[in-house]
Image: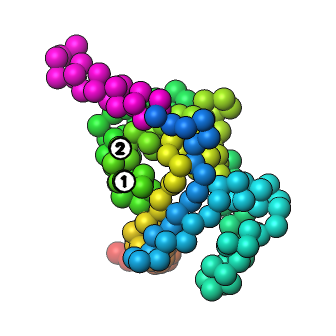
Amino acid sequence: MPYITWMRNALLAGVSAIVLHAVPAAAAEQLVFTFGPLRPAFSIDELEAFAAGGRVPSSMRFYLNVSNTDPDVVRAILSEEFDLSLQFVDQKFNTLLGEFVLFQMGKIIHTPSRQANIQALRSALVLSVSDDNKISLIEFMRNYPTQELHIDGIKLSQVARNLRQVSNDIREVRSRIQLWVAVGKDFLSDLADCNCQ
């Protein structure tokens, strides 16, 4: 193994160990959204109870009403489980491309100090999938290795807007392809019926 690769792996292992061992017995306790100067915070315990079918936490009611968001949609987003194997997380998120993905995610989901974001995200992923090869958003938040998990609401809304635009672009391209295929079929059908000599 080349020396630089060995040093990089050793450094990553060391930083991950520091992050994991610095974690208090109860990891994330609060989810903090930042919208410029606004910083609403929500208890992970309350969110977990809500995701399991409980009542809407009082700290969330105002924000759900203002954003006209259905609590059942939020509950579904928090509790929906996705299959994700520990082997996949280990193999993919310990590569250069995987670290780039974590780096980009760390711009939105980050530690209070905005430091060691890659290690914190990787740690939360590993802890979440390690027992059952499944992950949910609430489980990820619970396993995040700092007492506060911060989400940059402005950057998150920019990503959502970009994804909507990409989705609209894909729909438009698909519609054009379907039109071209229909026109092409008609043209080929007319050409087959033609007694041109």
**Residue type for callout 1:** Ser
The label on residue 34 is none
In the picture provided, is 23 more to the left or to the right than 66? left
The 10 Å Cα crowd at callout 2, few under 14, some 14 to 19, many 20 or more, is: some
Residue 7: in magenta span? yes
Is residue 129 depicted above or below 188 in this figure? above
Whether residue 79 is visible here, answered yes or no, is no
- Report if the CB atoms under discs 2 and 1 are less than 8 Å apart: yes
Residue at image point 69% right, 59% down = 47
Q: Where does the magenta region start and end?
A: 1-21
Assess disc 1: are there few (<14), some (14-19) or many (≥20) residues with their C-alpha within 10 Å of its C-alpha: few
Between label 2 and label 1, give the one nearer the viewer: 1
**Marks 2 and 1, Cα distance to the nearest angstrom?**
9 Å
Q: Residue at x 67, y 81 (%)?
A: 62
Q: Which mark is residue 113?
A: 1
| Residue marked by disc 2 | 116
**Magenta segment main secondary structure:** helix
On the image, the x and y values in percent for residue 190 come to 47, 78
Q: Residue 57 magenta-drawn?
A: no
Q: Quadrant of residue 132?
A: top right
Labels in figure, total? 2
Q: Nearer the viewer, residue 11 or 70?
A: 11
Q: Nearer the viewer, residue 79 or 160?
A: 79
Image quadrant in which the N terminus is located: top left
Is residue 57 visible from the viewing direction of this image? yes
Residue most extreme to the left: 3
- Identified by mark 2, the residue type is Ala
Q: Secondary structure at mark 2?
A: loop
